[in-house]
Image (cartoon, coloured by chain):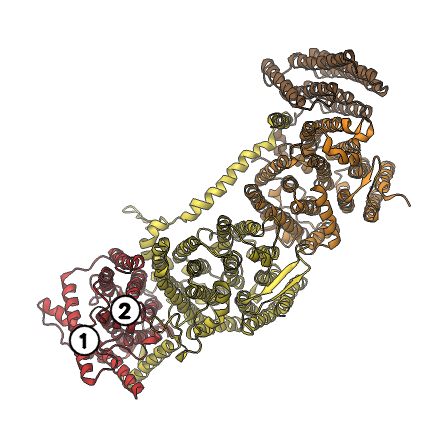
Amino acid sequence: MIDPLTGILFVPAVAAAVLAVLPGYRLSANLNVVAALLTFLIAVSLFWLPQKAGDYLLVDDLNRVFIVLTTLVSFTTSVFSASYIGHEIEIGRLTPTYVRFYHAMYQVLMFAMNLALVANNIGLMWVAIEVATLTTVLMVGIYRTHEALEAAWKYFILGSVGIALALFGTILVYMAARPVIGEGPYAMVWTVLVQHAANFDPELLNVAFVFLLLGYGTKVGLAPLHAWLPDAHAEGPTPISAVLSGLLLNVALYALLRFKMLLALNPAAIAPGPLMVTMGLISCVFAAFMLYRRRDIKRMFAYSSIEHMGIIVFAFGMGGPLANFAGLLHMTMHSLTKSAIFYAVGHISQVKGTQKIADMGGLTVTNPLLGWGLVLGVVAIAGLPPLGIFMSEFLVVSSTFARQPWLATILVLGILVALGGLFLRLNTIAFGAPRGPTAPAEASYVPMFAHLAIVFMAGIYMPPAIVTGFENVARLLG
Amino acid sequence: MMVTYALYGVAVLLALAPVAIVLAASPRASSVVYGAALVASLSLCVIALASLFGQPAAVSATALPLGLPWLGAHFRIDALAAFFLIVVNLGGAAASLYALGYGRHEEQPQRVLPFYPAYLAAMNLVVLADDAFSFLAAWEFMSLSSWALVIAHHQDRENIRAGYVYLLMASFGTLSLLLAFGLLAGSGGKYAFEAIRQSHLSVALAAIVLMLAMIGAGSKSGVVPLHAWLPLAHPAAPSHVSALMSGVMTKVAVYGFIRIVFDLLGPPDWWWSMLVLGIGGITAVMGVLYALMQHDLKRLLAYHTVENIGIIYIGLGLALAFKAHGMPVAAALALTAGLFHVFNHSVFKSLLFFGAGSVLNATGERDMEHLGGLIHRMPQTAFVFLVGCVAISALPPLNGFVSEWLTFQAILLSPQLPSWGLKFLVPAVGALLALSAALAAACFVKAFGVSFLGRPRTPAATQAHETDSNSLAAMFFLAALCLVAGILPGVFIDALAPISHALVGASMPHQSGLAWLTIVPIAESRSSYNGLLVFLFVSLSGSIAAFAIHRLASNRLRRAPAWDCGYPDPSPATQYTASSFAQPIRRVYGTSLFRAREIGEMPPPGSTAPARLVVDMHDLIWDGLYAPIAAFVGVASERLNVLQFLTIRRYLTLVFSALVLLLLVLAIWP
Amino acid sequence: MALIRNLALQGSEMLLVLLLAPLLTGFVRKVKARLLRRRGPPLLQPYRDLIRLMRKDVVLAENASWLFRLIPYIIFAGTWVAAALVPTFRGGLLFSWSADLIAIIALLGSARFFLALAGLDVGTSFGGIGSSREVMIASLAEPAMLMIVFAIALIAGSTQLSTMAAFMASPAVGLRVSLGLGLIALIMVAIAENARIPIDNPATHLELTMVHEAMVLEYSGRHLALIDLSSFLKLLLYVSLIACLFAPWGTAAPDASLLELLVGVAAYVAKLAVAGLLLAVFETSIAKMRVFRVPEYLGAALMLALLATLLRFVSGSF
Amino acid sequence: MHGLQFDIAHLLAGSLVLVSFMMLYQDRLYALLNTYALHAGVLALSVAWQAFIQQAPHLYITALIALGFKAIVIPVALHRIIVRLGIHRQIETVVGVGPTMLLGMGLVALSMVVMLRVTADADPLAREDLAFALSVVLLGLLMMVTRRNAVSQVIGFMSLENGLVLAATGAKGMPLVVEISVAFSVLIAFIVIGIFLFRIRERFDTVDMQALDRFRGERQ
């Protein structure tokens, strides 16, 4: 029995190696699913693993939540991608070579994300996140179309600058830690840093946080650093859009949270809260307005991701047990819902043969399951009950309004505007007279409805175990 | 435990939704769903009655491990909740009974059946909820399910648009309520209503909560100027749903307002009542004037709901004023008037929408200009519709009159209020109330006269047929209820006593003991009314006259062409239409309020073109409030959209400037 | 014993108003004719008309509905009950508590409601014209009336007509501004409500300005008789309302002896005569106004009444 | 450490900033390339010096990479590309050189202010080095945003990255420095290849947005 901690890194790595050489997409797709499932199961076993921190890896309440979420969504996405890629091959949009590459990259991505989550060394975390970024860059460009390359290139350049900034921040953290902890690798080990954070040089930490906020914020997709996100979502294969929105943003956010905790432990340093709150609000409102002019369905939901990331960052920026809890909950719900939406969108655009909203219509008539699935997803993402996001938004707003009335009001307006934008398009897509080809979809509905079911459940009843877990994390985040 | 039984009922309704999804294909689905919904609503109604009359002021509460963790979902039935449960489920039962017949004509049952029971359940849950989260969740779920019902006939773009506006306004309301609860619960997150009752807010915060509640609950119940969605959404839904939305859901919104302002918010400040009264008065008059300008039957009814909501809020405002000045008895009178009107309106508005639905079924027409003469083809519908019209026009001896009469009595008590603002405002509001009552009568003369009387204006109206027995049963039931509530108001007033006791600390004197079932709000010498006697007198003297004349004079009768001063015109086009009927009133009121203009186009001499009369009107509230917001969103999104098309270098510039900005912040940080 | 006496008196009052109503109208017509240097119809002409109409067949328009035949009785009953609830020659009516002044006005309102429906029933253009104008006028007259009631009720501390009348008869009521305003407004409203000149012309047909007559155009025989009788009753009702509120002199006490009662009746008849005289003089001395001047006229009445109420709200001394 | 070593390290770091300014000043691609080669060379020197004074032999690898890869390979490759794409003539700046220089001054001042607020007990070398590194980074970024030409933007990015390496090496005993420098070299290689592959002549975003509109109809 291998140690689960290394297991969640080991399995994807091996799978990647195998998939890289394995011909035949059917087999490799199944293998992909199996590997993802295996990783997920191992990750679940982490819950029974005591907290432990080595020099390079660690498990604590915070990253347990993230890891399980990540592995779960990557598993369901792999199921979805199996049917999606099958269709892409049939219509000849992808060649088997590319598909092999795709599957290998998928597992590499899983590996990188898991590594970023379990890394106990801020340098290692940085490396992992950058690897994840570069992998997604390659996958975004996989269609080799004009726009796909364009999007990938944009993502690549902006991402590289983000990488550089994040690295500079990391170096600064090390510089801040060194006088206290002493030279050598220990000054980059997370658990050690946390213990001594109070004695670090505050000014240095401030500068460091600015760079980290911008560097990792680029990955989170906060405005005005978001530019890569919509196009990357729109032009890449839909499973990758789902992974990007559902997972990669979370991973970057996770890094941000780590450093926020570090700063929060140092009384003399500036409070990271206000910075995060500001960027969160800007992202939320900006993205909400951007929803109105969208013509491309995937780009629209990409902007919706930006909006929700804004809400989450706002919640964490406000801090406090309730807001942190809400932030975590919102993050989880958003990952599940948004990936479910992208599953639906993927099949829809395959049925309609386009991503132009104007060419879709009356889906609830032609493809009831897909159509109503999308409606349910949008209802969830717009924060309507009885689904989970309503609960998290309820907690965010109600717990912050008493403290910061104006900020909460702005947030609420953003949410309202976003709802308007989403439903404006949903009306065109799901209702009215059918438009475009109306062939029945050969789709795998299981992942989508599984996610939606979880979200629905969470909106009504949250198991105490999860609640306590979240509460611990919320307390951890301070 | 009443509340437990009630929750069972709600659970049944909720369970019906998936059942409906499964059954949707089969032809028997509608009768199954509506039948089950009818039974559930009736039993819920019985439960509510039991808890209201059983032992008044008895409160039964429970909590389920649902909703917010570490809080759970709290549910509670007190007198107020019980009363509104009765309103909700009475309407629900009637609608289900009606739909047993009406629903058969639904062409897309699978888009109606699943949401209908969910909608009923949501409304029940709002009333039952006892903590902020459950309340808001149920509230928004209510909006969501009704949205689905509004866009049930989604081929019509108008319905989609109506649903869109509706959902936006509903979420707007919910979010402002959310902010209100955010203040009430505080950042500590004490979301249970019990905890909120304990905590006390500062005056300023309480005022903010009041305004947020006014916006939130008001927008749901359709107070001017937040009413814009209502006349769009209510008519768009299938008629039995329209009845529920107009007759019941608006009342649930009123419940939310009462729960927050009278129960949770603690002692009121006197000027709050100014706000509520002013809004109520304006809403009443504007609502009925809008209604008078319509010629779509269902839209007319929807607008008229706005008027009645205004009357209800006038009652509540007066209650607030009296409560703030420590006049509990008067407050009880005003509150009772408001609540009684809540009940009455839910009854006759549902009745009227049912009637409109039957007309829609029989003729396929909602436009009054295409109706007429239906009283000959569908006499029973015409009769019940007439009853509804008389009741809603506040004419004795039916129920509408009683609640407005009580409101007038409350207004007559208000000179004793010390504060000057109220001294000036209340009489004005009284005048507005009187005005709206008179206009309501005009409005329903138009509604009934144009669509049921006269000669058929279209073949559709000529071939109309009487509606089915289930629908008729539902309508006759409600009509009977109008009469009963009109001639035996004492019973209802006594039933409302525990509520006013709980909310304003006093109740109206006990009525049902009085001779001849008279009602005496304050004192015998001051005012009293006896619907029963008035009813008896009128019917007696009428029948005596009829008897005498037929016996002593003549009872012979000849049919002949209409006289019409000797110039009868065979074409039904010469009748007064809905818009021509409203023309004098439009000239009197609409010239300023709607910028109504009549443009007569007279063809030049010699041309054979017909002369045309064009009436152009503007909804100033829409033009002045909603259109600018929409325009702003459009412009803002257009401007920001440029950011989608920048070059990478410019994006880098954004990153760069963000970095420099933050560094500057650090540099100047103290 | 007392109950029987009261019942008898109540009944006698109901019959009295029924009997006097045509006479009042006849009297007004007679005086108007005299003022115009015509002989005019005899005083009892209205009775003759009524009886003749009752005897005639009803000629019913082909597409008249059952409602159309029912309406005259409803109108008559409503008006009669309302009239019976207004004290005439004696205060403290037996059933006065069953409906206060607001309810009485609402009763008249329902009568009007049905009359307007009747105008629309046959589906003729004249009927429509009548109904639509009637509701327009009512939409201003009713609020005005209610405001007047408010003003007086606030002075008398009751909306109960008998109590109000008793209070107005008592010395407690002095000269008050609001009362004056109320009286003027009440008279204006009464003229409008009874379709008198300058609002409407009760003695005309075939004129596009008619309101009341246009609505009843299709009625004939007993139906028409009942409607006419109702309008006579309405006129009487308003006169006796004004009388019992603003000229409560000579009204007999509830427990009055037979002689006092006779005095009361005499006083009442005298008041009616004076009112009829004044009305006739007023009507002959003024011309009918255009339909769309009416809102201004009634708006003035509404404003006066509102002012009276407002004064009462602001201070008890007005 | 005693003064001399400190002064030399300081001198080298400072001269790196100076070279960055020189790069900002260039308006010919070849000249720019050469200046960049100089930049990399200076970096290599300072890294080597750090390796020497910190007795950290692994830093020599970084120095070698800097020298070999950045100062020689990349410039040569870019030289080829320029010739191949025939863009050696033009170099379009968004704002004139003068304002750019002024901006650069401001940035250097900013980084100084920010860094010198760091309390002195962090050893001075680190402080000064960091200040210089930060200015190099900012200047590199400035270069990226003020040059339209793809190659010059790449050069800007590379100078930015030099700043990072300077900071990393200045951070005494920091692990992973070598790996990071390698990783970055790979990254840069990617970018250069990308430019070459996608035939990006003028700027990073040759794919005009109208094309995007045509395909996606994002703009009405």
Mark 2 = which residue? C217
- Secondary element type, mark 2: loop
Callout 1: residue from which chain? C
Residue furthest right in the image: A1
Question: Looking at the colours in the rendered structure, which chain would you say is drawn in red?
Answer: C
Front tag of 2 and 1: 1
Residue B126 in sight in this render: yes
Is B157 drawn above or below residue B32 in the view shown? above
Question: Looking at the colours in the rendered structure, which chain would you say is drawn in orange?
Answer: A
Question: Looking at the colours in the rendered structure, which chain would you say is drawn in yellow?
Answer: B
Residue furthest bottom in the image: C1
- Nearest the viewer among D26 and A210 is A210
Label ID, residue C250:
1
| Quadrant position of the N terminus of chain B in the picture | bottom right
Left or right relative to B300: residue B145: right
Is C178 drawn above or below residue A87 in the view shown? below
- Nearest the viewer among B211 and A331 is B211
